[in-house]
Image (cartoon, helix red, strand yellow):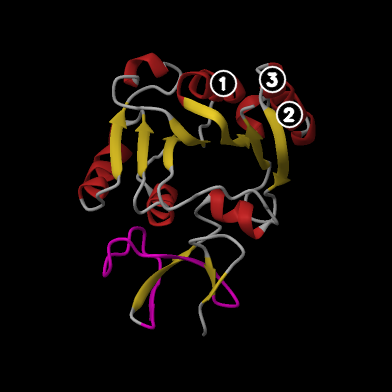
Amino acid sequence: MKVEPTQFRGLYFDGRDVLTKNLAPGESVYGERLVARGGTEYRHWDPTRSKLAAYYRCGGSAFPFEEKSHVLYLGAASGTTASHVSDLCPSGTVYCVEFSPKPFRKLMELCGRRKNMFPILADATKPESYAQMVGKVDIVYQDIAQRDQARILLRNTNAFLRDRGTAFLIVKARSVDVGSAPSEVYKGELETLRNGGLKLMEMVALDRFEKDHAAIVVRKP
């Protein structure tokens, strides 16, 4: 299949799947297919394994990742999505915060093979604990299964996000409130972000790939 660029820099489509240019040619991170076209190797980006890919496939239209973007990734786990962010920002930096030691071991191995990824074993609820390792960033991306998801994002955007920077909150409705309708949970999390001074860019439900999940994209004025 022919690989063609999408409307977003660094993001490609082959008629069926979304792809990124592989920053570490020859290496597959989570078993994704690699494909070579015109001397360039691309990685298929599985939307069932990555909420950011799901966001794009569900019609997301805010995609601020530039070649030199600095990104703070909260909840990086073993690095599946973070590795694609690394592809998107080859001359930037991806600070990968993960709290659980088991996936962090795999994350460290991955970061050792990717020059722009930096692993940080820390609790995202306490940004002061890694403030000396993270500078100002252009993008904050959060995918954490905790009850106070919006407040965690606010603590980190207040600490690290540049003015006019973008933040992504992947809301896991059942982690916030198992008894409420997901749509009401999304509204509540959005209200918390607005009260914290962030401006809504868009909210996209991810149910096509992830049931009871939504991506809220906000901007710092």
Q: Which residue is mark 2?
A: 185
- Asked if residue 29 is among those painted magenta in the image, a careful observer would answer yes
Q: Position of residue 81 (x, y in %)?
A: 44, 50
- Residue drawn at x 38%, y 14% is 128
Amino acid at dot 3: Thr
Local crowd size for mark 1, using a 10 Å CA cut-off: few (<14), some (14–19), many (≥20): many
N-term-proximal mark, 2 vs 3: 2
Amino acid at dot 1: Leu
- Residue drawn at x 29%, y 25% is 133
Which type of secondary structure does the marked residue at label 3 adopt?
A: helix
Q: Which residues are magenta?
A: 14-38
Local crowd size for mark 3, using a 10 Å CA cut-off: few (<14), some (14–19), many (≥20): some
Which type of secondary structure does the marked residue at label 1 adopt?
A: helix
N-term-proximal mark, 1 vs 3: 1
Closer to the camera, 158 or 18?
Answer: 158
Q: Which residue is mark 1?
A: 154
Q: Which residue is mark 3?
A: 192
Amino acid at dot 2: Val
- Asked if residue 45 is among those painted magenta in the image, a careful observer would answer no
Relative placement, left or right, of 19 versus 206 is left
Q: Are marks 2 and 3 in contact (CB under 8 Å)?
A: no
N-term-proximal mark, 2 vs 1: 1
Q: Is residue 82 above or below residue 21?
A: above
